[in-house]
Image (tube, rainbow, N blue to C red):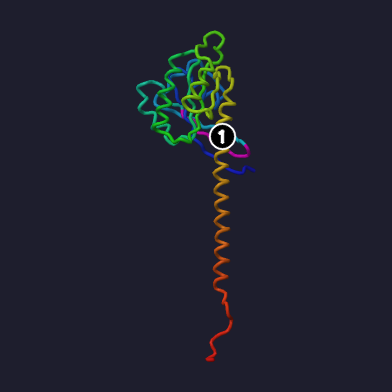
Amino acid sequence: MYTSLLEAKVVILGSQGVGKTSLVVRYVQKTFSANCTSTIGASFMTKKLVVDNCKVRLQIWDTAGQERFRSMAPMYYRGANAAILVYDITSEESFRDMSSWVEELRKNMTEDLIIHVVGNKLDLAATKRVVPIERTEEYVARTLGTEFSVHEVSAKDDDGIEELFLQITRKLVERKQEIERIKRQNAENAITLQQLEDERLQQGQTPNNSSVCCGI
């Protein structure tokens, strides 16, 4: 029996052509097509899984990377619990575009947003890589902080996709469990305080002297 349920929104951001749609389709549908059409506006898919005895429903939003749709992006990723910033390890331009997506998130999202930075097209690393992972790690540590995660994946080869989403989901579940733990603790503390207050009132109502006025 599952101990809890969690619904979470995950948004995928990045420039056009980095493989955002392929990444989502690979994770949800376990398929890959080299001829994915560019996303217009945004689309989403749903993935259900169980992590740490928690039943999870992820709503994964794939946003358009084209410049003409950039102004629409906040409408789609508002309310997200996690964000995946995707770049292409064979494209210097897509890596440099990361800074504008980071700014978008900072302007529109809360500070507790879970962010993972992902270099896609790992299957081309041997022949076409232009962005070393060390450079990405340095950028993320400097710009976002060391607590944020960096991955390299291949949607084509299904390499690292499952682990990426599993790490994100575990963080979401841990956060939910911590919130529930704090709520339980606060409720227990409130009950204890109420009990102490009830005892104090009962003691205060106990007469110090049981004699009554007898006209003496």
**x then y, percent, for residue 55:** 59, 39
Q: Is residue 139 left or right of residue 50?
A: left
184 vs 52: above or below? below
SS category of the residue bearing label 1: helix
Point out the residue furthest to the top here: 127
Q: Pointer 1: residues within 10 angstroms few (<14), some, or many (20+)?
A: some
Q: Give the residue number, with chain letter if any, for mark 1.
A: 171
Q: Residue at x 51, y 27 (%)?
A: 116
Q: Is residue 154 left or right of residue 16?
A: right
Residue 57: in magenta span: yes
Q: Residue at x 58, y 17 (%)?
A: 157
**x then y, percent, for residue 91:** 46, 13
Point out the residue furthest to the bottom here: 216
- Quarter in which the N terminus is drawn: top right
214 vs 94: above or below? below
Q: Residue at x 36, y 21 (%)?
A: 67
The image quadrant of residue 107 is: top left
Residue 144: in magenta span: no
Q: Main secondary structure of the magenta part?
A: strand
Q: Residue at x 42, y 27 (%)?
A: 42
94 vs 45: above or below? above
Which range of residues does the magenta coloring cover? 52-61
- Quarter in which the C terminus is drawn: bottom right
Label 1 is placed on what type of residue? Lys
